[in-house]
Amino acid sequence: MSRNIELLRASLQASKISQNVIVHPNGLGVKPSLCILYSDNGNVGDGHTICDITSEKEAIGRIPRGYSLRQVINSTRLDTLVNQNIDVMKIDVEGSELYAVQSGIRLFDKYEVRHIVSEFSPRMMREKRSDPYDYLKFFVSRGYKIRIVSDQLTSLFERKNEIIYVLFKKAFFCISSSLDKNKNITSLYINHTHFVIIKHNE
């Protein structure tokens, strides 16, 4: 949402690292499309999307009760925005994680993505008509290994909100930044609930 981007840019300016960060104010999707961003009336920073809409009026009828329209956006593919090796990637897109990574197939297949942190909710993914197992398989099929990083996994998974924390180790609005010019570390954050970390094998 535009307000979140304004806050992000203000934070970067205040911390004096803005010269090392590029903010891409883009939604991500498997194919470019018109989307809406909506959020809970009590939590306006909680962004959700509906894509492939024909008009804002049509989309408003699909917004759940207790939520409000925040913005109309155009989505694009991740692999049209980023074409370089990535050291750290963070994904938190409220159930659209599979679509976000599918939009970056060429990035994952052509370049090296060493570490990935992804917060995801199987319930939210199913509500968005995607399969959380397909999300995990996306990484496993590319040589990543899965490891649980929280001993709370069982109890969290059994709760209604289904939060999962796992580590993937290898042999959605995004930021790419060079955090340390000497080490040439590049991070990619795809923003918008479950914590997954994916690490490249040495």
Image (cartoon, helix red, strand yellow):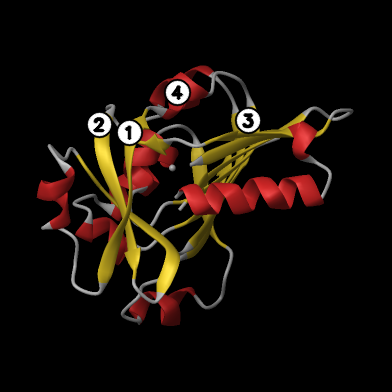
| Cα–Cα gap, marks 2 and 3 | 26 Å
- Mark 4: few/some/many CA within 10 Å (<14, 14-19, 20+): some
What is the count of numbered marks?
Answer: 4
**Residue at coordinates 59% horizontally, 25% vertically from top-left?**
112
Q: Which disc is residue 33 wearing?
A: 2
- Marks 1/3 in contact by CB < 8 Å: the verdict is no
Instruction: Please determine whether, in this image, residue 110 is positioned above or below residue 148.
Output: above
To which residue does mark 4 refer? 79
To which residue does mark 3 refer? 86
- Mark 3: few/some/many CA within 10 Å (<14, 14-19, 20+): many
Instruction: Please determine whether, in this image, residue 180 is positioned above or below residue 166.
Output: above
Give the mark, 2 or 4, whose residue is nearer the N terminus.
2
Residue 78 placement, left or right of 48: right
Q: x and y percent of residue 70 in the render?
A: 34, 55
| Cα–Cα gap, marks 2 and 4 | 15 Å
| Cα–Cα gap, marks 1 and 3 | 24 Å
- Marks 1/2 in contact by CB < 8 Å: the verdict is yes
Q: Quadrant of the C terminus?
A: top right
Give the mark, 2 or 3, whose residue is nearer the N terminus.
2
Identify the amino acid type marked 2.
Ser
Identify the amino acid type marked 3.
Ile
| Cα–Cα gap, marks 1 and 2 | 6 Å
Residue at the extreme right of the image, as rendered: 182
To which residue does mark 1 refer? 74
- Mark in front: 2 vs 3: 2
Identify the amino acid type marked 4.
Asp
Task: Judge by depth and name the residue closer to the eye, 145 or 46.
Answer: 46
Label 2, secondary structure: give it.
strand
Residue 191 placement, left or right of 73: right
- Mark in front: 2 vs 4: 2
Task: Judge by depth and name the residue closer to the eye, 181 or 156.
Answer: 181
